[in-house]
């Protein structure tokens, strides 16, 4: 999730209640307070998307569309990098072949 998505989500009072509930449950499990920051981080990574899917279906669809678009952009960038690396490799192979040919010609 992006920071802007998290900020928007944390404005919702129901989300804060869920985070406080998570804080209480996890603190009871370990026997001491885990702290609000850890509880918030855990809840956002583990439960935020599921909560959005159930409680905010329209915003969840927009979020998923953004996520897919970002993933496809990253995939395209990765493919471009592979092509560029392959081009660089072929150029260096050609150069090294030319150098080895010139070295062997000099030796004779």
Image (cartoon, rainbow, N blue to C red):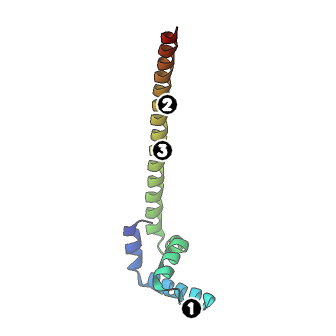
- Which residue is located at x 56 percent, y 91 percent? 32
Q: Secondary structure at mark 1?
A: loop
Q: How crowded is the residue under tag 1: few (<14 C-alpha within 10 Å), some, or many (20+)?
A: few
Residue 84 in the image, given as x and y percentages of width and height: 45, 35
Q: Which mark is residue 32?
A: 1
Q: Give the residue at the far top of this rendering.
A: 108
Residue 56 in the image, given as x and y percentages of width and height: 46, 73
Q: Which residue is mark 2?
A: 89
Residue 7 in the image, given as x and y percentages of width and height: 37, 74
Comes first in the chain, label 3 or label 1: 1
Q: Secondary structure at mark 3?
A: helix
Out of 3 and 27, give the one closest to the viewer: 27
Q: Quadrant of residue 59?
A: bottom left
Q: Secondary structure at mark 2?
A: helix
State how far apart marks 2 and 3 are (Cα).
16 Å
User: Closer to the camera: disc 3 or disc 1?
Assistant: 1
Q: Which mark is residue 78?
A: 3
- Which residue is located at x 55 percent, y 90 percent? 24
87 is higher (above) or lower (below) than 102? below
User: Closer to the camera: disc 2 or disc 3?
Assistant: 2
Image quarter hosting the N terminus:
bottom left
Q: Give the residue at the far front of this rendering.
A: 107
């Amino acid at each position: 999730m992006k920071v802007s998505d998290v900020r928007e989500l944390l404005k919702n009072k129901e989300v804060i209640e869920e985070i406080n509930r998570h804080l209480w449950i996890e603190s009871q499990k370990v026997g001491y307070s885990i702290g609000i920051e850890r509880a918030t981080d855990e809840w956002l990574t583990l439960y935020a998307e599921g909560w959005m899917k159930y409680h905010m279906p329209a915003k969840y669809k927009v979020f998923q569309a953004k996520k897919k678009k970002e993933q496809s952009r990253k995939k395209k960038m990765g493919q471009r990098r592979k092509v560029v690396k392959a081009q660089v490799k072929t150029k260096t192979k050609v150069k090294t072949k030319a150098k080895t040919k010139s070295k062997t010609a000099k030796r004779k």
